[in-house]
Amino acid sequence: MKTETLLQKILRFLYPVVRKLGRISKNGTILHNEKSLEPPKSFYELKATLNNGQEADFSDFKGKKVLVVNTASNCGYTGQYAELQSLHEKLGKKLTILAFPANDFAEQEKGDDKDISQFCQVNYGVTFPLAKKGVVVKNEQQQPIFKWLTDRKENGWNGHAPDWNFSKYLIDEQGKLTHYFGPSVSPLSNEFLKAVQ
């Protein structure tokens, strides 16, 4: 069992403070597809490999909202796993949450896929899908989903890459990217829930 380290316990305790302080920085950024622009490349053409080796075909998500989040186990925002799980339990029939662990920010996700999965299940009771660990920042190794999310030529309007771990991208029931929420925006906040409803 992959229980929390002392550092992870401290980070969980400090999460409310980190979130509050982050709201006044770029980590509190909220972007919205105000003109309701359509994506030139279909979201439903994309696929991702989950950490159990199975493939997630995004065409299976037609008719549901999808929340894509880049995650890490040793981050001040790691406490959002609990909030994401709560959101999954409340809205799982109309919202699919996909977590994409990455070691791109301050090397806060050094574990392998098995460690990450155990950590999430043991400490946060996570039951929503976790993708295979990969790259979310803009470079040649960036995962296809994050290339789509951060390239206007693919999604229609947004070029904003993740500011840090737990950046959140919301896609509507027709496969249109509608929002970007920075790491400090809680998935249980009123502004977030309003966008998801």
Image (cartoon, rainbow, N blue to C red):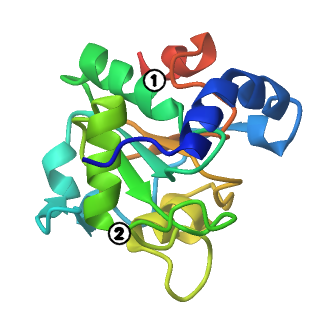
Residue pointed to by mark 2 = 112
For label 1, the SS is: helix
Residue 192 lies, with reference to residue 50, above or below; the image says above
Q: Amino acid at mark 1?
A: Glu
* 88 or 75: nearer the viewer: 75
Q: Residue at x 62, y 75 (%)?
A: 138
Residue 83 numbered tag: 1
Sooner in the amino-acid sequence: mark 1 or mark 2: 1
Answer with left or right where residue 28 lies relative to residue 40.
right
Q: Residue 176 occupies which quadrant of the picture?
A: top left
Q: Amino acid at mark 2?
A: Asp
Q: Where is residue 145 drawn, in percent x and y?
A: 41, 65
**What distance separates the C-alpha of mark 1 from that of mark 2?**
23 Å
Task: Kindly give the residue lying farthest to the front in the view shown.
Answer: 6
* 89 or 78: nearer the viewer: 78
Answer with left or right where residue 117 lies relative to residue 36.
left
Residue 1 lies, with reference to residue 83, above or below; the image says below
Q: Residue at x 25, y 33 (%)?
A: 64
**Residue 184 in view in this figure:** yes
Q: Residue at x 44, y 41 (%)?
A: 4
Q: Where is residue 133 drawn, in percent x and y?
A: 38, 68
